[in-house]
Amino acid sequence: AARMFLRLLSDIQWRAAHPKWRRMTSSQRSTSTTAEPHPVSLPAQAQVVICGGGIMGTSVAYHLSKMGLKDIVLLEQGRLAAGTTRFCAGIVSTARPVSIELKMAHYSNKLYQQLEQETGVQTGYMKTGSVSLAQTQDRLISLKRIASSLNVMGIPCEIISPKEVLQLHPLINIHDLVGAMYVPEDALVSSANVSLALATAASRNGVQIHERTCVSHVTIQKGRVTGVETDRGRIQCEFFVNCAGQWAYELGHSGEEPVHIPLHACEHFYLLTHPLKEPLSSSLPTIVDPDGRIYIRNWQGGILSGGFEKNPKPLFTEGRNQLEIQNLQEDWDHFGPLLGALLRRMPGLEALQIMQLVNCPESFTPDMRCIMGESPTARGYFVLAGMNSAGISYGGGAGKYLAEWIVNGYPSENVWPLDLKRFGALQSSRTFLRHRVMEVMPLMCDLKVPRWDFQTGRQLRTSPLYDRLDAQGARWMEKHGFERVKYFVPPGSDLLDLDHSKTFYKPDWFDIVGSEVKCCKEAVCVIDMSSFTKFEISSTGDQALESLQYLFSNDLDVPVGHVVHTGMLNEKGGYENDCSIARLSKRSFFMISPTDQQVHCWTWLKNRLPDDSNLVMEDVTWKYTALNLIGPRAVDVLSELSYAPMTAEHFPSLFCKEMSVGYANGIRVMSITHTGEPGFVLYIPIEYALHVYNEVMNMGQKYGIRNAGYYALRSLRIEKFFAFWGQDLDAFTTPMECGREFQVKLDKGMEFLGQEALWEQKQNGVYKRFTMFILEDHDTDMDLWPWWGEPIFRNGRYVGKTTSSAYSYTLERHVCLGFVHHFDEKTGEELVVTTDFINQGEYEIDIAGQRFQAKAKLYPFSSLFTQRRRKDEVELSGYQRE
Amino acid sequence: FYLTPSQVNSILKANEYSFKVPEFDGKNVSSVLGFDSNQLPANAPIEDRRSAATCLQTRGMLLGVFDGHAGCACAQAVSERLFYYIAVSLLPHETLLEIENAVESGRALLPILQWHKHPNDYFSKEASKLYFNSLRTYWQELIDLNSGETTDVREALINAFKRLDNDISLEAQVGDPNSFLNYLVLRVAFSGATACVAHVDGIDLHVANTGDSRAMLGVQEEDGSWSAVNLSYDHNAQNEREVQRVKMEHPKSEEKSLVKQDRLLGLLMPFRAFGDVKFKWSIELQKRVVESGPDQLNDNEYTKFIPPNYYTPPYLTAEPEVIHHRLRPQDKFLVLATDGLWETMHRQDVARIVGEYLTGVHHQQPIAVGGYKVTLGQMHGLLTERRARISSVFEDQNAATHLIRHAVGNNEFGTVDHERLSKMLSLPEELARMYRDDITIIVVQFNSHVIGAY
């Protein structure tokens, strides 16, 4: 085995690149693995310490030093690029479904291409292109969706026929293919050499690199990183970057205060062969056959082929801190099915001689997306790990974004989908991670249809009503560990397989959700929304109000009992959170945020609220069960249960009052439904949850009450043009860009975070605008359904992407929400988006390559709001989260 | 023409039976977890029989396989009756009295055995009264004999075997007024059967064997591998001690004619057996019984035929050899099987196949390419074959079935070859016996936790 790795690394020339660097490491290379004195001693302090000398650590070091940081130390416990990076298959592939991942991969490709010229280190970069094969029509649809998003990014990409595949790669058996996607600019590299090239460049820029230096733990004081303890002494530092790959979890838990980095390693196998009789050309494209679960690239005249099997082997669950990844066992029996898939795809390789089966552990995360960002518990503690086997593709871009994060306080793109703070301690159980990654690894190849959900690691957080709802036919999905109802299968309905239906077309729950929506419109429905994040903020004096007034963009100095919908903005005016805040008393506030804000919002506020023992913030998420009563008859149900008048005169919209419901007292009732429909949300102390639910259902019978789920809620909110944080809104979207200027206290003369940026936008206009699209010539029964991420075309030119979509049962049309930009036709420069620009255009939405006409709207249909209340109330309630 | 895998399975599984010892309070306190058994016929009808029962008035479980020859009548009778004889031999004096009193006064009898039977394992209704009377005579004698000593399992087994064989012989000599029964008892006596019976009580395992069926213990070594320990001696010409015994019991003048072509008197393979009165009775007795017997018996060439060199009967006995073994935690299972299995498989392979089946662990050497020149195609073929080997395990829910699959279908590499299995199972009735014998297997699984706690 060792011989093979020497061959992989044989063309390393990085030693010649930098004199100081060479001295330090060449002596080590010349001797065996026994310990020896380190020629260069560790510095006592540095600004940034990076742990991990793989592709991630070297990329972060490279970019930090490029951005001008001088005082950087990179520590590697073994040798540079000796971990997963060394074994990595070296495929740079931009075909990624998540837009931010696509951008990272695209950047990586461009970076690697010029790296050899920049550093003089051979990286083995070869632009071979890649061909992703489709054995089924559904697979082809998913490839077409990716192709659409690649094309609008300016990345060449085309859908090709099986015959064209044969022209690109003569060995492929095409008889079972329906089509393929060709990305001509995808590349191959020697991943270890890329890593060494980045290290070389970083070293030239002043980064100190120390191999054979093991970080034992990171010291944290008062919630800030203060230094790093290593086996060679301590380094004081301001920033620490955990790029320890599959050891990142353990390193995070090594200190007194744990930093939860939810990832888990699985064994990953690939095969290396001797050259063919007529050696394969090094320019042959890489083949990805997701239906066969394999990838095949050319390698030194032979092939390298691996895959993602259905039954992965997780490892290091108990945490085994070995220095470098030892040569793990080859397991041919395990690899058998993948070998079968390889020979089916390329039958001509039967006689090709095996060189080796490489076992290379890869780390996977609970949601198949990588982990980057700052720890919510320790400022200055950054993480970049959990690459889900795409480390080489992401390496360049991920390192760049993290470097920007450290230097500028935030990356240049919205990286929330990758942010460490999307997880909390709750995803950190080893058992959970072990089970989840066994699902995630096969998912790398599985077909992902709209609204797919994880099946493992479920039922972690549940409402007290879980069993009751489940018994009534609830079908569940999960968000931040919390089980939430999608819809209820009616009794006697023959739809047992409903959860398993996989389609890009009209789903079979269509009519079920339709009847739930109808009930919301005509009678009353109950939706359990307990998963919402709930904080209480109170103070002895005016501290709470004063602090919140600065941190939130809307005016919170409202009469007691009012509910305010407001953004929590960053300096650039972008939404860090979108929430509703009820003023419970002069000095206390109750804040409702999206489910996955639990960690992020807490951290954001904790870091910005004054350090004052008289100002208390408490996470009360677990204390309340939330029942959303939606519909015109909600008012009747509630007034009968409370013997209190609930009409608009007594209980206006956006109002909050503690009252009794049934026998239970102290229920926080808010006249808000997050859908634009009339109704109330009841925040019930959990011990009363079952009682109140039973009372509501019993009393509601005569009003036609029924249970409903989030799919109905989603349809209702999207048809009313309500944006949702985390999907439509992000840290790069301001209230001005989504028509919410009325939720900002710009004219009240109060200072608040993001104010200047919003003033600027108010004066100069916005560069993107949140817009609603009604699909015109779309046949709900026959055509592909929109999901999100579909390109929007205005007068035939690309202007942006959708962020969410739903079928409106009232309009009987699909509604897509998305952002419209204005790119200059010649220069591509972004111009101000005006109302006229939006209104004077012909729009099309591209669903998997097929364009549908769409009508753009900047305001919702007023006819959809069943009850006219105060004019501003309708708009004020106009926010939503899921 | 080939049988499909599902056709093969339905043939193999037709006679399979499993018994799990019931748990009390979620715990199985017995040293036996349960057993799997199965039969594959080669003769039509099959001449093997099997029995399993739990003793209700004493502790312990009885399991046995019986290999009939010259018809199935004797094996059938022994499979029905032997366990009652053993159970009665084990009963304490008071229980015997209680039973006798119950019969005497027409009260309900205490149940003695709880049978664990496959639907195809039948009992003869017609003979039950006759069999019962013989059994009653036996316990009445035991009551009269009352030695006052506690019953020794070894002795009980020997006595039961000998007594039953004696009763078979007597019943044939006395005959029965009912012509059907009369013919039945004669057929039982003139046919023969070997018996291999295990009695498990706690950690005490006794195996009583008469003939060439075999009991084998599966032992798991510390390294996880499997080995076999014999718990019976074959009574045939391959057993030197057995040949010596036969020679000792007869005058020197017969030495040459006693064992010919590895057979007793040149005729019989097993050297001990139930029935087979042709090797036990005097010539006069044989002639008298055959002549006074029904026409069917008279017309039968075999029954009329007197073995050559027949000078000093009896030449054959049903007395078993008993081996006692104290169970240890590493003793994981016991295999009782008729010679049909042992002819095709070495006991070491039997131990490994059953052991791996029961633990679900397959000690297949992992494949390493190392320095060999292996092509992708070769590797693919090798892996496919290894997968097939494993999947054949999961097809079977019964260890005995799994063993039969291997016994019949194994190729030269020790893996189940579907083609071969299909051929062997689709042989016409008249040919089947030429390629294989009846196979009957019982696999008893032990409870190591309970055994370890003794």
Image (cartoon, coloured by chain):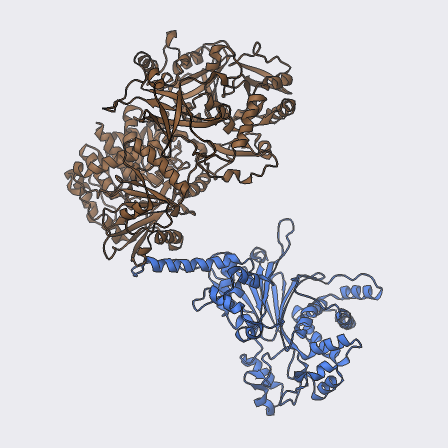
Chain colours: A brown, B blue
Query: Is residue B357 shown above or below A537?
Result: below
Horizontal side, residue A421 vs residue A829: left or right: right
* Front one among A826 and A267: A826
Q: Nearer the viewer, residue A648 or B97?
A: A648
**Nearest the eye: A777 or A757:** A777
Is any atom of residue A863 visible in this view?
Answer: yes
Q: How many marks?
A: 0
Measured along the vertical axis of the image, is residue B438 above or below residue A752?
below
Residue located 43% across and 34% down the image = A784
Residue B402's spot in the image, x, y percent? Answer: 53, 62
Instruction: Kindly identify the residue that appears in the image at 64 percent across and 18 percent down.
Output: A641
Q: Is residue A130 above or below residue B51?
A: above
The residue lying furthest to the bottom in this view is B253
Give the residue at the far right of this rendering.
Answer: B105
Q: Is residue A634 above or below residue B230?
A: above
Q: Can residue A628 be seen?
A: no
The answer to whether residue A338 is left or right of residue A297 is right
Percent position of residue B73, x then y = 68, 74
Is residue A239 or residue A510 the one in the foreground?
A: A510
Left or right position of A735 against A395: right
Question: Can you tell which quarter of the image residue A108 is in?
Answer: top left
Residue A823: x %, y % from top left: 28, 23
Q: Position of residue A83 (x, y in %)?
A: 30, 44
